Amino acid sequence: MLLLSRSARALFRGLYEDRGKIALGVAAIFGLLVVLSGVISRGITRPIEQLGAATRAVASGRGSVPNPPPTAAIEIQSLYADFAVMAAAIERRSRYLRDFAHAVSHEFKTPLAGIRGAVELLQDHTDMATEDRSRFLANADADAQRLALLVTRLLDLASADMAEPGDDRNDPGPIIVQVADAWRTLDFAVDTGPITGLPDVVVSAATLETVLATLLENSRQAKARSVTIRVSHSASLLDILVTDNGPGIVPTDRLRLFEPFFTTKRDKGGTGLGLAISRSLLAASAGELTLIDGDIAGFIIRLPIKPR
């Protein structure tokens, strides 16, 4: 057997003789590390730090998500885009809550002021005539009933906003016929036309009943004598068109029709929450409620069709 070995002295001599090559390799590796650190800093670290600062500014309500640096990695640019969408959604929600809180305080202020005024009058005039006392008590009772109705409708709206998508599958035909039969009277006609062979839609029966009942109630309050319901569908969507022969909607009211608490029937007990609740209920099932263009009063209920 032949054993070959190299002494440590020979090894060190070889390293010494190749010291130039080794130094060049070390320098090359060091330079590569510097370049990589610069690339990582410009493409990942700095953009993430900037995004973190922007996120903290958005959280405090004093800023927005900027455009990503052009040197940022593609994944970081996508992250910037996602944060921008999230920040915009948060801003819309915050603005909605501010407006909603203002509207709630305004709606509650009027009946509360009426109740308080009636109580003060009754306290200050203990010898008030029975007829006057009865009138003030009736006014206070009416204001209290309106407050109770507002609270109930606000709870309905909150439930609609928090509704989760379900796995409902329903034939809309029988639901439409059932609601139409319930609302049809001698002085209020509801024409559904032929409704057969419709595809199943992704919405609960309770949601569709609530939305249809709201639209029919609005038509009746608007002095309409007849309502027409027509159904059409494509491969993926089903449209329910609801129109009436009422006086129509004033052009200045069309833009505010879905705003919470906006109503033209306040003197008749309207809360202005029916359409807002209906739209939120449908949104939970990926549906839509829109106002049709034109002079006539009409709405389109758009529902996704359940795949077979």
Image (spheres, grey):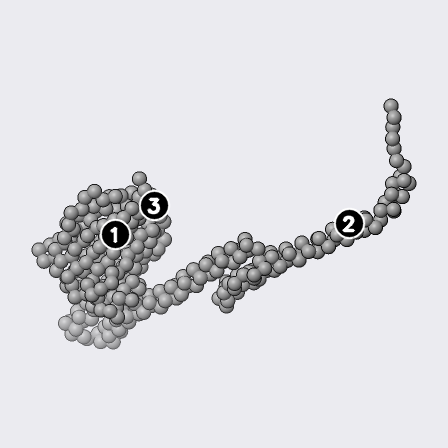
Label whose residue precedes the other's in the sequence (2 or 1): 2
Measured as percent of width and height from the top left, residue 143 is found at 24, 66
- Foreground mark, 1 or 3, reads 1
The answer to which quarter of the image holds residue 85 is bottom left
Q: Looking at the image, do the residues carrying marks 2 and 1 touch, with CB atoms under 8 Å apart?
A: no
Residue mark closest to the camera, 2 vs 1 = 2
Q: Dot 3: few (<14), some (14–19), or many (≥20) neighbours within 10 Å? A: few
Q: Amino acid at mark 2?
A: Gly
Q: Marks 2/1: CA distance?
A: 72 Å
Looking at the rendered structure, the kind of residue marked 1 is Asp
Point out which mark residue 166 bears. Answer: 3
Looking at the rendered image, the quarter that the N terminus falls into is top right
Query: Disc 2 designates what residue?
Result: 25
Among the 4 quarters of the image, the one containing residue 15:
top right
| Image coordinates for residue 14, horizontal then vertical, percent | 87, 43
* Residue in the foreground of this view, choosing between 261 and 86: 86
Q: Which residue is mark 1?
A: 239
- Total labels: the figure holds 3
Mark nearer the N terminus (1 vs 3): 3
Secondary structure of the residue carrying numbered label 2: helix
- Of the image marks 2 and 3, the number of the one nearer the N terminus: 2
**Res. 263 in view:** yes
Image check: 13 left or right of 160? right
Say which quadrant the C terminus sits in. Answer: top left
Say left or right for 199 vs 83: left
| Cα distance between the residues tagged 2 and 3 | 64 Å
Disc 1 from disc 3: Cα separation: 20 Å
